[in-house]
Image (spheres, helix red, strand yellow):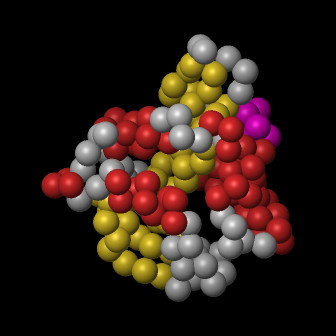
């Protein structure tokens, strides 16, 4: 498989990115309602994608994952459900840490897989917020990379 990483998307890639985002969220964010997903989808497509530096992992056919960065913060990291557990998330995260010097991330507390993923690479919980940035009652964990426990496994 020919792969292109990091692929820097343009606005013409946004429909593919938001479709990937929705499939990923449906597969991993079981605590969200369909109404929540629709509302977040609109925010991400019309606001958030333009507020981050986006990098994608793609093969010759499609985008398989993407990460959105803002200074030292990982704002979003999503992998297509068919591409999970193939090292794409790891490659995106290591790129963010090692190339872009990102050390912070916010994770939904109910997303056990994401929490475990970041903990595996040396992130630790620093703070907990009762509501997400949209004011919804989905607790958020502020995590920060602990250099002493960082592994690029």
Q: Which residues are magenta?
A: 11-18
Viewer-proximal residue among 145 and 99: 145
Task: Using the rendered image of the protein, determine whether residue 8 is visible from the camera's viewpoint.
Answer: no
Task: Answer whether residue 13 is magenta in the image.
Answer: yes
Identify whether 74 is placed above or below 10: below
Task: Using the rendered image of the protein, determine whether residue 7 is visible from the camera's viewpoint.
Answer: yes
Viewer-proximal residue among 120 and 16: 120
The residue drawn where x is 37% and y is 78% is 127
The residue drawn where x is 45% and y is 63% is 115
Viewer-proximal residue among 102 and 146: 146
The residue drawn where x is 51% and y is 28% is 6
- Which corner quadrant holds the N terminus? top right
Task: Answer whether residue 103 is magenta in the image.
Answer: no
Q: Residue 75: horizontal and vertical position, in percent?
A: 51, 56
The residue drawn where x is 33% and y is 51% is 121
Q: Residue 108: horizontal and vertical position, in percent?
A: 54, 69
Give the main secondary structure, helix, strand or loop, of the magenta stretch: helix
């Amino acid at each position: 498989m020919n792969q292109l990483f990091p692929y820097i998307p343009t606005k013409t890639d946004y429909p593919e990115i938001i479709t990937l985002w929705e499939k990923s969220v449906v597969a991993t964010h079981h605590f969200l309602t369909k109404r929540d997903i629709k509302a977040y989808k609109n925010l991400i497509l019309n606001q958030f994608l333009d507020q981050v530096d986006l990098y994608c992992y793609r093969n010759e056919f499609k985008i398989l994952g993407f990460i959105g960065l803002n200074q030292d913060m990982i704002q979003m990291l999503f992998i297509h459900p068919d591409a999970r557990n193939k090292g794409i998330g790891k490659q995106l995260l290591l790129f963010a840490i090692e190339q872009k010097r990102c050390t912070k991330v916010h994770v939904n507390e109910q997303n056990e897989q994401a929490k475990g993923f970041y903990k595996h690479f040396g992130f630790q919980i620093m703070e907990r917020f009762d509501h997400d940035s949209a004011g919804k009652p989905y607790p958020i964990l502020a995590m920060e990379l602990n250099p002493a426990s960082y592994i690029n496994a």
